[in-house]
Every structure is written in C-alpha cells, then in structure tokens.
Amino acid sequence: MSVDSKIKERVEELKKIIQEHNYNYYILDNPTIPDSEYDRLFRELQTVEAQHPELKTPDSPTQRVGALPQTAFKTVSHIIPMLSLNNAFTDEELEAFDRRIHEKLQSQETIEYVCEPKLDGLAISILYENGILVRGATRGDGSTGEDITQNIKTIKNVPLKLRGDFPSTLEIRGEVFLPKAGFNALNAAAKKLGTKQFANPRNAAAGSVRQLDSRITAQRPLAFYCYDIGKGDETVSTSSHSKDLEKIKTWGIPTVPLLSVVQGYQGCLEYYKQIQIQRNQLPFEIDGVVYKVNQKVLQEQLGFISRAPRWAIAHKFPAQEELTIIRDVEFQVGRTGALTPVARLEPVAVGGVTVSNATLHNMDEIERKDIRIGDTVIVRRAGDVIPEVMSVIKERRPHDTKPIVLPSKCPVCQSAVVRIEGEAVARCTGGLFCPAQRKETIKHFASRQAMDIEGLGNKLAEQLIDSGLVQHVDDLYKLTLDPLANLERFAEKSAQNLLDALEKSKSTTLPRFLLALGIREVGEATALALTKHFTALEPIMEASEEALQEVPDVGPVVAKHIIAFFKEPHNQRVIRSLLDAGIHWPAIKKTDPSKLSLSGEIVVLTGTLQSMSRDEAKKELVALGAKVSGSVSPNTTLVIEGAEAGSKLNKAQALGIKVIDEDAFLKLIKREHSL
Ligand code: I6G
C-alpha cells in the first residue's frame, strides 16, 4: 500500500472510531474510553487533516470547531413548513383538547398520547443527505429560516454522519438548548471577564446559535434533542410517533428524554404532575410538556388548524417570570451582618403566588443590571428559590427613576457599614450589638437542621430579642415560664411547649451543634466533615489553620473563619454556657476509612436521580468511600439506577452487577450522616 493510501485509511479509521465514541457518549450515555484517550485520537485526526487538507470531509468530527465568520445568514426555505404548537394553560384546556380530538375522530375510544418535556430552547431543522449533515436552519417564520449550518455542526451531540439504516434524505426537527450547568458556567465566565451575562438559558442558546462567527458558537456548551421527523423518504415513517422516535435513535440522533406513552388525558395529567415535581432537578430548563396523539393514522385524520397540528398540544407550566415595577429598595441585615438589597415591588402573580419582594443580591448586581427605583423589571420565581429581579425593561424607564444607594449606616443599629475591597457584600459592623444580627442568629440556632427547637420560628425569635428576654443563644436555656407567658399572643401552654422543646433540643449531635453556632461558611457538609475528622469539639476549637485545612471541604477562607470564631472570647463564653446548660451529644468514634459503607466499591450512576444532581450524587458516593466510574465494566461492583436508566443498566444486569435504586441509595447516605 502506498503512503498516501495508508494515510487515507488511517483517517477513515480515526473518523469511524471517534464517531463510535461520540455515539457511546452522547446517545448511549455509556463512554467506553477515558477522555484522555478520546482527546489523543481527536488530536491525531486533526494533525493528519492539517497535513493533508484534501482528506478533510464535511462529516469529519474535527469539523465542529467552527468556520470563518460570515457577514449574514443565508435564507432557507423549509421543505415542509415548521409549525408551531397550540398551548394549554389549565387542566380544563387540556380536557377540551382531548374532547375536540374525540369529536373530530367521531370516536369514544381512549386516545394514546406520547408525552415529552418541552425544552426551553430554540426549534431548528437539520437536513441529512445520504447520511451527511448538509444543512441546519432556524424555524424563522415557519416557511423560511436562517441557514445556521456552521453553528449546528459545532453542537457536540448532533451527529455529522448518521449510522445504521438511514434514509437517503432525512430532515429532522428538534430543540437546541443550553443545559443549566453550561449556562451557569457561561455566566460565571462572563462575570469573571466583566462581560454581559445572559438573562436565561433560552436567550443564551438563541444568542449562541445565531452567531455569525461559528468559532464562538463552538465554545458554547449547546445540546440538541430531536422531537420529530420533518421529511424523509417513504422508508422513514412508522405507524406511531413513539416508534418514529425509536427509529431516529438508531440513526444516532439524540431524542428528548423522559418520554412516556400514556392513555387518555388523565394519563397526560399524571405525567404533567410527575414532570413538574422533577423540573428543578432536571439538567435543562423546560417550560411545560408536549402531548401528541401517538397513532399516525389518527394524526392524519386530525390534520392541522391554521399553523398548528390538531393532534399535539403544549401544556405550559405557570409562568415563572412576570413584569412589575420597583417601588422602593430596603436593606435587610443578615446573621453575619451582610446587607441585602430587597426590592419592594408592585405586587404581581408569578406562577400562582403573589410576589411583593425580590432580592437584588448586592450592589454589584444592581450596577450590573442597571436597576433604579421606578424601573419596570422582570421578576422570576422558580421553585422554592427566593424571587429575584432578572433585568430591567429599559424602554419603559420613566424620567424620574431614583438610584439605589448603599446606606453608610446599618438601617437597624446605626453602626457603620463597610464594604471590603473586592467583596460584593457590604456588612454592618455592629456584630452582636445589632438586634437584626442577633435575631438572625437565634433563628439559625433554632432551625430544623441545627438545634431543631420546635415552635421557635421567625416571629418568636423576633419577639424574644425585642422583649429583651434573650440577647444571645445561651439565654434561650435560661428562659422561665412566667416572663414567656407574658409575651404577646403567648399563653402558659405555648410557653411550656417552648420550654419542653428547648429541653429536648439539649440532646443533639456534634454536627448540628457546630452548624448552630453560625460560624461563617460552615454549613451542614462542613460541620459533618469537621466532626468526622476531629471527632470532638475541643480539638476543633483549638485546631490550627493547617490542621483545619486537612479536612475535606475546608479551604483557607473557611479555616480563617473557624479560627476567628473560636478566638473570640464572647463566643467561648456562649459555648461554655450552652454546655453548662446541659447540651450534649453522643461520643464519636473515629471512622476508619476502610469501614465506610461503600469503601472499595466501584460505583456507576445511570439515569436521572430525583433528589439530587449527578454531581451531588458523586460527592455523596465519594464521602461513602466509593470510587465513581462513568461506565460499566467487569470491575464495577455497584450500579445506582435513576429514572429512565439506559444501556448502562442493561450492561450491569448482563454482567450480574448489583443494582440499587434511588431509595436504597438515600438510605445509605442517611445512615452515614446519622452521627
Ligand atoms: O416546539 C416544539 C417543541 C416540542 C414542537 C414539538 C415538540 O415536541 C416535543 N412538536 C411539534 C410537532 C412542533 N413543535 C410543531
């Protein structure tokens, strides 16, 4: 064989190997080689192609790096118009959709629906000719869109070449989006560079896909999921939408996850509730779910109404963002003295709840978003998160808006406010002289994760400080019946209940006690790590910075906070007083790392966990002594199965590897944490 044909053969081989690994990684979620090996193969292909540009083909995996900037996008006519979906905002609207279908079909039979999450991204079309990606286009007005081929080719999970038994012409439709992690990373990088941050993942995805310089798009961690076939030859279509999606997957194209086939609109409603629960845990943003009549014959009978299919509907979640006006801004003082600007809003219903306050985080954020009193703003309330002001609608700014000024004195205790150079947070210097800080300290001390003092909520903590009955946390254990019963809206019974709860709280655990002390940057995980490492309070109080930094989770900043806290004579006095009051915890034995419940185990996670992200699960596993691996091999000793587990589960079962579900995993974590 000549040198040239040898090189050509190697290029073909490399392309094939890399394409296979892309498929394993992006479609099967089952990488079979380490990243370093993949990178080596990729670099080899890049090098050979650079030396022999004539061997570079449009389907080469190296073609994802972006091409030279364009001056404008070309216009593309869609072969079949890209339609939109009708929306349902209530259960009744969904029921009406199902009723219309029955009427149109003149049938009483229960309809089978395919349910999918509705990704909050951008609809696109991708065209393959003879299995090679030749064109990517935006939806545009539905008839014509923009040619964004170069940008689509940079998206890592979009195959440049199809596999299996694909049709000669295939046009697919789907959604381009930025996973939450990618969005956060992008905004964190922008913040560091001082460049503009994106308001939400959808805007970030839209901005990235419509870049004239595809080298910029290539740096954005975009992803794609296909939801439908646009056009293919006659070999493409099956008898149902769910079978179509199965077929699409065999060509190496990623489809929308968490798909479910259900019966009737009741089945759709159950799916909706299920996805709503999972929503915050999902790795991508969704704004609702989509239901489609599964059987193609029925879809054909139903047809279209104006520009939307009669056989599909998007069931939207209540809006998480609304417009309102900032009437005023006040500064709240937290436990550590941090001043948080809070916007007082014209009350507005967001996702079914009236919102009148929203956090503005800190002065840097106010400056970055250019927020003024009187501005019309977008407020967002997602899940349990505190509502926040996302951005200002500048076009609606009246001429008489007022700037937001950081007060020079604490609004509660009048002590000086300082802002340390380089820190975003401004703080009241009043310390425990400041009633606001003392109230927050009591609330934190009594909270469920800390001393768990039942009945001692926000209101009572404020009453106790305002009445002077309590100054510091140790005063709680000196409370007696009479003065308590004299508090407003407090009777003898509730006073006795509080005393009982205080007595009960004396029997605690060391991590809870450490958390309750309110040391800066010491949360639940750090309190637990400190306990595991030192096994008693005294060595923690006396530890040097170096000794503290040996604890996993403790870096130089946290170590400094811990030292400063225990050095303070006032804190030492409060701790002594708490221990004298009878607070105690069981003695802790030093954990031998080989005795951790998963020590020596090689664990693989598969599917979506409902209660935590993959990163959190990995941390928990490491804390349990396990090694975490990305793929199942004969060395794997345990697989944790989440929802929609894929091929890793099949492989584990084939290899006879132990599989546990999320509940069993949570029990393991709980046992380890029950110090
Ligand atoms: O915009 C869309 C999002 C998701 C869709 C869609 C979809 O299915 C999961 N399906 C169709 C048929 C259309 N738009 C037109």
Image (cartoon, rainbow, N blue to C red):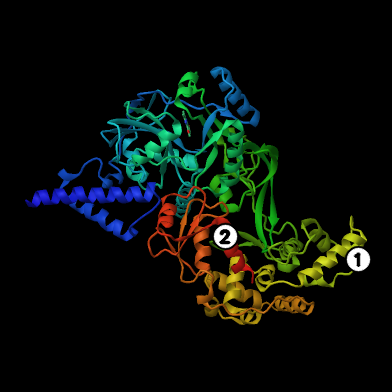
Horizontally, is 489 left or right of 249 in the view? right
Residue 645 spot, x, y in % from top left = 47, 50
Residue 464 spot, x, y in % from top left = 83, 63
Q: Is residue 594 above or below residue 77?
A: below
Q: Secondary structure at mark 2?
A: helix
Q: Nearer the viewer, residue 274 or 157?
A: 274
Q: Nearer the viewer, residue 17 or 528?
A: 17
Label 2 neighbourhood size at 10 Å, few (<14), some (14-19), many (20+)? few
Q: Quadrant of the C terminus?
A: bottom right
- Residue at the spot x=22%, y=52% of the render? 45
| Spatial CA span between label 1 and label 2 | 48 Å
In this rendering, does residue 486 appear at all? no
Say what amino acid the circle numbered 1 marks: Pro
Of mark 1 and mark 2, the one earlier in the sequence is 1
Q: Nearer the viewer, residue 180 or 355?
A: 180
Horizontally, is 357 left or right of 547 in the view? right
- Residue at the spot x=61%, y=31% of the render? 89
Q: Is residue 1 above or below residue 507?
A: above
Residue 5 spot, x, y in % from top left = 10, 48
Residue beneath disc 2:
664
- Residue at the spot x=50%, y=76% of the render? 594
Q: Secondary structure at mark 1?
A: helix
Say what amino acid the circle numbered 2 marks: Ala
Label 1 neighbourhood size at 10 Å, few (<14), some (14-19), many (20+)? few
- Residue at the spot x=19%, y=49% of the render? 11
In this rendering, does residue 408 appear at all? yes
**How many labels were placed on the picture?**
2
Q: Is residue 39 above or below residue 205?
A: below
Q: Which mark is residue 667?
A: none
User: Foreground mark, 1 or 2?
Assistant: 2
Residue beneath disc 1:
483
